[in-house]
Amino acid sequence: MVLLYRILTSLIYPLLFIFTYYRKIKKKEHKKRFKEKILISHFNVKRNNKNKLIWFHAASIGEFKSIMPIIENLNSYKSNLEFLITTTTLSSGNLAEIELKKFSNVCHRFFPYDVNFLMKNFINLWKPNFIFLVDSEIWPNLILKANKYKIPLALINARITLKSFNRWNSFPRTAKIIFNLFNLCLSSNLETKKYLEKLNAKNVQFKGNIKLINEIDEKKIENINEKILTQNKFWVAASTHQKEEIICLQTHIRLKEKYNNIITVIAPRHIERARKIKSLSEKMNLKSQILNKDEHILDNNEIIIINSFGVLQNYFKLAKSVFIGKSMVKALENDSGQNPIDAAKLNCKIYHGPYVYNFKDIYKILETNNIAKKIESYDELSVNLIEDLEFPKKKYDGIENSINKLGQTTLIDTMKEINNFIFDETK
């Protein structure tokens, strides 16, 4: 199967040009840097070979944000380190351009397709000393090349769903070869730990979900639209996916029956869909505005569609209630749920649909503390929002401290394993 995978990925390489250019036209790829994924000449290697290079591959925004405290921690520990972060999505690349300005030793590149000769050249040119794959980013050609060049390889915050476990288990010999090549596996939950062990991974440990690590300094959060939002009734629909916006707009219409000054803020998971959401709003006779970074909300607009990255905390700080998306689409059931942690830390009441597979452990904690609640329809969401909007924003005493404490424990335990892995401190 390994040989077949290599042959197939090499054969489809020419088609990846068409696929990538199509995505660029649809504004799903970076308009200038998209060639980093498909051309060796655009790998744009920048590193000091005298330093150790640590490569983190994190697919999207959530994974990117989760590794930043780890990089900051490693930076404070050693001075002769450089970091390469690769991601796959346009949104994560845009966020990286903002977040990495404060570092002089961290580069971001888009992850090349897992084609054998691309991976060979990428590794040979960058020459990483260590490779960390984050979450569920398991790419056979990369893993096999790392093993060939004797580069230590770790899987951190690993997440293996039942669906992906069954898929790997359909090729048990290949799975055992691939997973056994990881030198360290830190799982994000106990279910994944069990699956990894069955797939022949070694040195598997559970230290907690690193997405709990980030702490929030509310004093640094500002929103230029604070006045108009707080003078009106408003709520936030965050990380929404296709088909969920219609639920949000139906909810808005229901809320308008009670409040004539209601504003619904929609932050789609993929902001390139902003115009489609605006068109949908207009079809429902709702006045909408696509809000770019540092723009003011104009008077009389009731649906505000966020068209920038890294701004959700600005709205969570002010909002009483938040709906977290990727939770109402049954087709995504086995890969469902978006991260509710920031909203919880900023004292929002959180609503979500029935499908939250990726964050079910975290939602369980939040639901136990009456911070999160499952809803099944826009009717149910509307009823709950009306109740929330009648009262001042609630302070969930102790929950931020509890999450931060859990995050710090996770960070300490995770860093102990990573430091041992990189610096061999056990010897």
Image (spheres, rainbow, N blue to C red):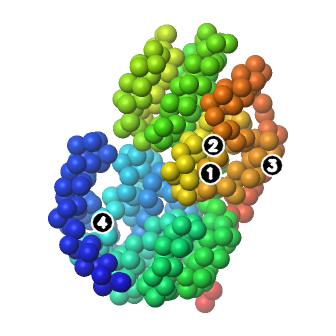
- Amino acid type at circle 4 is Tyr
Q: Kindly identify which residue carries mark 1.
A: 356
The image quarter containing residue 188 is bottom right
Q: Residues within 10 Å of mark 2 (few under 14, many from 20)?
A: many
SS at circle 3:
helix
Residue at the spot 68% in from the left edge and 38% down from the top edge: 375
Q: Nearer the viewer, residue 294 or 342?
A: 342
204 is higher (above) or lower (below) than 388: below
Q: Residues within 10 Å of mark 4 (few under 14, many from 20)?
A: many
Q: Kindly identify which residue carries mark 3.
A: 368
- CA gap between label 3 and label 1 equals 15 Å
Q: Residues within 10 Å of mark 3 (few under 14, many from 20)?
A: few
Which tag, 3 or 1, sits closer to the chain's start? 1
Q: Kindly identify which residue carries mark 2.
A: 353
- Amino acid type at circle 1 is Val
Q: Which mark is residue 113?
A: 4
Please name which of the two marks, 3 or 2, marks the residue nearer to the observer: 2
Residue at the spot 70% in from the left edge and 57% down from the top edge: 361
SS at circle 4:
loop
- Amino acid type at circle 2 is Gly
- CA gap between label 4 and label 1 equals 28 Å
383 is higher (above) or lower (below) than 154: above
Dot 2 and dot 1 residues touching (CB under 8 Å): yes
SS at circle 2:
loop
